[in-house]
Image (cartoon, rainbow, N blue to C red):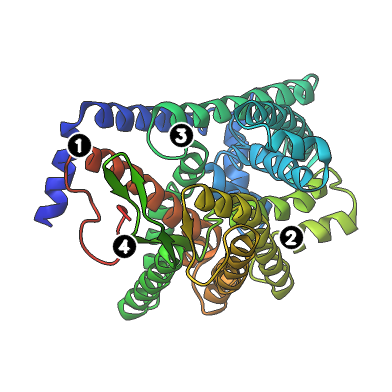
Amino acid sequence: MAGFTESIRNVWKIEELRRRILYTLGLLIIYRLGAFVTLPGVDASVLAEINANADPNNLLGLLDLFVGGAFSAAGIFALGIMPYITASIVIQLMGAVVPYFQKLQREGEEGRRKITQLTRYGTIMVTALQSIGFAINLQYGATGQAIVIGPTFFMISTVIVLTSGTMFVMWLGERITENGIGNGISLIIMIGIVAFLPTSLLNEFELSSNLFIFLLEIGVLCVVTAGVVLITQGTRRVPVQYAKRVVGRKVYGGSTQYLPLKVNAAGVMPIIFAQSIMFVPATFATMFPESAFMQQMGVFFTDISSWGYSSIFFVICVFFTYFYTAIAVNPKEMADTMKRQGGFVPGIRPGKQTSEFIDNILTRITLPGSIFLGLVAIFPAFAIQFGVTYGFAQFFGGTSLLILVGVTLDTLQQIESHLLMRHYDGFMKSGRVRGRR
């Protein structure tokens, strides 16, 4: 505990790191305040009464988990950052099949700027589409109560406000990434999830049959969290030998180093992508409140306790783990870089054979990582079957836990890097989880 306290002191000793942390906290507070600003034309008191009697196991409850309650409260940030994630998925999928996007991916920094700009345009279109469904659900939803006060220009104003709100949230995320600490988009999603944790924990404690059961649930939660941390930080180290080189009067190389290949190289992105895909059918269902088939489809894609939902979610998680790993890790580029630097894997010829060797290892280690990721994603369904409340079950696995663990580790490692650059001991100087590796 003394070491942790000393690390906190070291963080505030560094002016740049202190400024980045305060800047990040300030922008996150602005985002949270937007969740409490109701859309123009919505009667907040009637909406609050409806939400108090609503079943959390539906689209509202699922979306609220990512936007900190702004969806059910009809806030100006009701759609949060999820349209941006959806647009990113579409652009990355097109990068795998469309030659134009493949060319942009090979153009370096200039290509990344064009892809980012196209993703922003895609975000506007996705947000506008989802805004229409959101407005229809508010104005013509089967609630039996008048939620909208002035319905004349409600559709137009809602689309404009929600689209502007999502673009503003996206801008906040980009500013956090550039001038703050951590990944801004991931932090915005995480802060919405954390907002539900105190209430969910309190409700579970009040509804629990006895103290022993509640403590047992906390113990299981800790075990699952430890497993997620283990898989997130797990790596397969490939030995790389560097040949000796004589430059002037100095001898370089001749040492053995290791190429770390992560078991879950995709990180937290597959679960975010998979959840975004699961949102699409439910979003379309809100546009057709009078269609029985669409409403059944909406229930199917929001009932996380059903086996059908869990099976589809598991398969999508496994697919996106492989897909995002293939995008994030380029074995050919690794092999070429290793060859230029005079490095080689013992027993493997440099170049194409090294690339194939790395690709085979990635394929093998990604399989258990993707299966574990999928199992953790559907673990809340098992928790609900054992009597855990819906809200607290979200933190037993699924998107909530994976995002919390992944984003927290990434942010801590960035803080660790700032501390080590200035010769301070970081948060992870002991134990098996080391941010300095």
Q: Nearer the viewer, mark 4 or mark 1?
A: 1
Q: Verify CB contact (< 8 Å) between mark 2 and mark 1.
A: no
Question: Which numbered dot is residue 433?
Answer: 4
Q: Is any atom of residue 115 visible in this view?
A: yes
- Please provide percent x and percent y for residue 133: 78, 38
Q: CA distance from mark 1 to mark 3?
A: 33 Å
Q: Verify CB contact (< 8 Å) between mark 4 and mark 2.
A: no
Amino acid at circle 1: Arg
Q: Which residue is at a point 38% across and 30% down the rendered structure image?
A: 180
What is the secondary structure assignment of the residue under circle 1? loop
Q: Quadrant of the C terminus?
A: bottom left
What is the secondary structure assignment of the residue under circle 4? loop
Write down the residue under mark 1: 422
What is the secondary structure assignment of the residue under circle 2? loop
Q: Nearer the viewer, mark 1 or mark 3?
A: 1
Write down the residue under mark 2: 301
Q: Verify CB contact (< 8 Å) between mark 4 and mark 3.
A: no
- First of labels 3, 2 by sequence position: 3
Amino acid at circle 3: Arg
Left/right of residue 291 with respect to residue 339 in the rendered view: right
Which residue occupies the foreground of this view, 74 or 362? Answer: 362
Q: Is residue 340 above or below residue 345?
A: above
Q: Which residue is at a point 62% across and 32% down the rendered structure image?
A: 108
Which residue occupies the foreground of this view, 83 or 162? Answer: 83
What is the secondary structure assignment of the residue under circle 3? helix
- First of labels 4, 1 by sequence position: 1
Amino acid at circle 4: Val
Q: CA distance from mark 3 to mark 2?
A: 27 Å
Question: Which numbered dot is residue 369?
Answer: none
Write down the residue under mark 3: 32
Q: Which residue is at a point 68% across and 50% down the rendered structure image?
A: 276
